[in-house]
Amino acid sequence: MRLRNKPWAIKLVNEHPESVLQNPDPEKKIDWAARFGNDHPIEIEVGSGKGHFITTLAEKHPEKNYVALELQTTAAGIILRTKLEKGLDNLQILRGDAANIDLFFAENTTDVIYLNFSDPWPKTRHKKRRLTYKSFLAKYKQVLKTDGQIQFKTDNAGLFAYSVQSMNNFGMHFDFVSVDLHHEKPEILEKNIETEYEHKFAAKGNPIYALWANFLS
Ligand code: SAM
């Protein structure tokens, strides 16, 4: 999804380097504890879009730290506006490419990586760009703690089938799999935080696919 550039969002991002890290130097490890002012556990959403999911999560869990990793500056600015409005000190925005996630975070540091409605890249020749391609999984494994988890949601059946296969081939284990998340048991549903895309596709009656997986051997 490509958002139309919003000058106010780009300006806001440039005015708040304490909240948004833009294309950091890959040679230098980011000191997340210094940025957050504490060493609480970290969870990352890759491709946060306008950020409804990650800002809601950060608001619900002040005891944890959250990083929204997002390619687009305009999206980063929209997330930042919510962060500032809600006073979410436990949310940082990282404007960068998930392909560099292993350079942005030290090994064995992250509890959960959320992949929500990632771009499907349906053409086979683009499969290396899918955020569940094996090169991405290898980087997530590095960044996640041993018992860390990937939580993935999509409305795209093709991307879901591909991701299950890719994770299975990588030797990952599945803690939860649903081909219709919005009709799961109430105890699952009450924990679910909808993303912007999820809201839109579920309203059209599309099933939402979800899985939680880990790298434990
Ligand atoms: N997660 C949001 C949701 O569910 O509403 C947005 C989904 S949108 C389809 C995908 C988002 O991922 C876009 O905002 C896009 O800029 C971002 N994105 C795509 N590839 C990325 C990458 N390699 N690294 C970081 N962000 C990426």
Image (cartoon, rainbow, N blue to C red):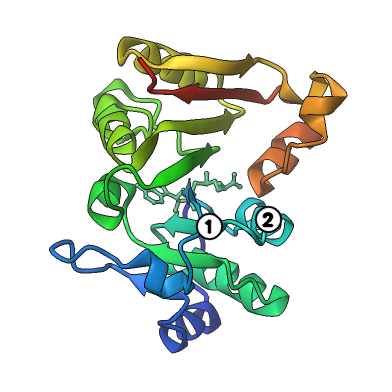
Which element type, helix, strand or loop, lies under badge 2? loop
Extreme residue toward the right, this view: 186
Which residue is at the front of the view, 108 or 124? 108
Residue for badge 2: 61
Residue drawn at (25%, 47%) of the image: 102
In the rendered image, residue 118, in percent from the top left (x then y), is placed at 48, 38
Name the residue at the bottom extreme.
Answer: 15
As measured in the structure, the alpha-carbon distance from the residue carrying label 1 to the one carrying label 2 is: 9 Å
State the image quarter where residue 69 is shown.
bottom left
Amino acid type at mark 2: His
Of tags 1 and 2, the one toward the viewer is 2
* Quarter of the image where one finds residue 117: top right
Q: Amino acid at mark 1?
A: Tyr
Q: Residue at x 47, y 71 (%)?
A: 36
Q: Residue visible at 51% across and 15% down?
A: 174
Q: Which residue is labeled 1 in the image?
A: 66
Query: Which x, y percent locates residue 51?
Result: 60, 58
Q: Where is residue 12 shown, x and y percent of the image?
A: 51, 84
Q: Residue at x 82, y 35 (%)?
A: 190
The x, y position of residue 18, in whole percent, is 44, 81
How many marks can you see?
Answer: 2
* Badge 1: residue crowd in 10 Å (few <14, some 14–19, many ≥20): many
- For numbered disc 1, what is the local secondary structure? strand
Image quadrant containing the C terminus: top left
- Above or below residue 212? Residue 19 is below
**Most distant residue in the left direction:** 27
Neighbor class of circle 2 (other Cα within 10 Å; few <14, some 14-19, many 20+) is few
Query: Which disc, if any, is residue 81?
Result: none
